[in-house]
Amino acid sequence: MFQKYKSAELVKPGGLDLKDRLVGVQRVTKVTKGGRAFGFSAIVVVGDEAGVVGQGLGKSKDVASAIAKAVEDAKKNLVRIPIIKGTLPHEQKGKYGGARVNIIPAAPGTGVIAGGAVRTVLEAVGVHDVLSKSQGSSNPHNVVKATFDALLQLRDANAIARDRGISLQQVFNA
């Protein structure tokens, strides 16, 4: 999922104090000739609230096992996000399907100004001051993936200097 992002660094879950947050549970129905078969789909975000976050999807016939599967899937998709002084390095837009998410760094003391699935992801990352706007689809699956799209495009000054092959001082003087 994260291969198209140069800065996406996959992280191993060992040694991290991960907290899981349930974004949503949907009851799904499969219609067969014998009737309706009900199941559940759960989307979960896990993070250490210090820059490491992952999202996962789990499906099962009961809610508890769907959530457990989602947590295991999320731990397999952990990535490191750059956070500077409790906020983001720069403004970024993300999209997935019909969902569009815009995240903007904010001054200290602002808090997390975000709704629903975006708030869950940003809190799991460990961002304390941010403004956001979610547009288009409000489907939690797509909103979470759009938020991850925006977060994975973030780059701090060290990454930019490394990519350009110049010193950190030259990044700010250019």
Image (cartoon, rainbow, N blue to C red):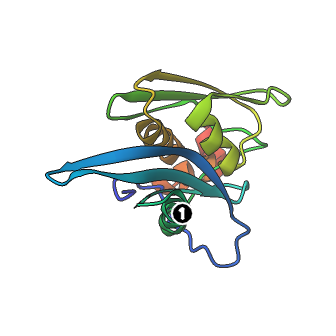
Judged from this view, the residue extending furthest toward the left is 33
- The answer to whether any part of residue 155 appears in the image is no
Q: Is residue 108 left or right of residue 94?
A: right
Q: Position of residue 160 (x, y in %)?
A: 53, 48
Question: Where, by quadrant of the figure, is residue 129 drawn?
Answer: top right
Mark 1: few, some, or many residues within 10 Å (few <14, many ≥20)? many
Q: Position of residue 174 (x, y in %)?
A: 57, 35
- Residue at point 65% right, 28% down? 114
Q: Is residue 129 left or right of residue 171?
A: right
Q: Nearer the viewer, residue 44 or 158?
A: 44
Tell me the SS state at disc 1: loop
Q: Nearer the viewer, residue 34 or 5?
A: 34
Q: Nearer the viewer, residue 91 or 39?
A: 39
- Residue at point 52% right, 69% down? 72
What residue did someone put label 1 on?
Answer: 78
118 versus 62 height, above or below: above
Amino acid at pointer 1: Leu
- The answer to whether any part of residue 122 appears in the image is yes
Q: Position of residue 70 (x, y in %)?
A: 50, 61
Q: Position of residue 9 (x, y in %)?
A: 50, 63
87 versus 15 height, above or below: above
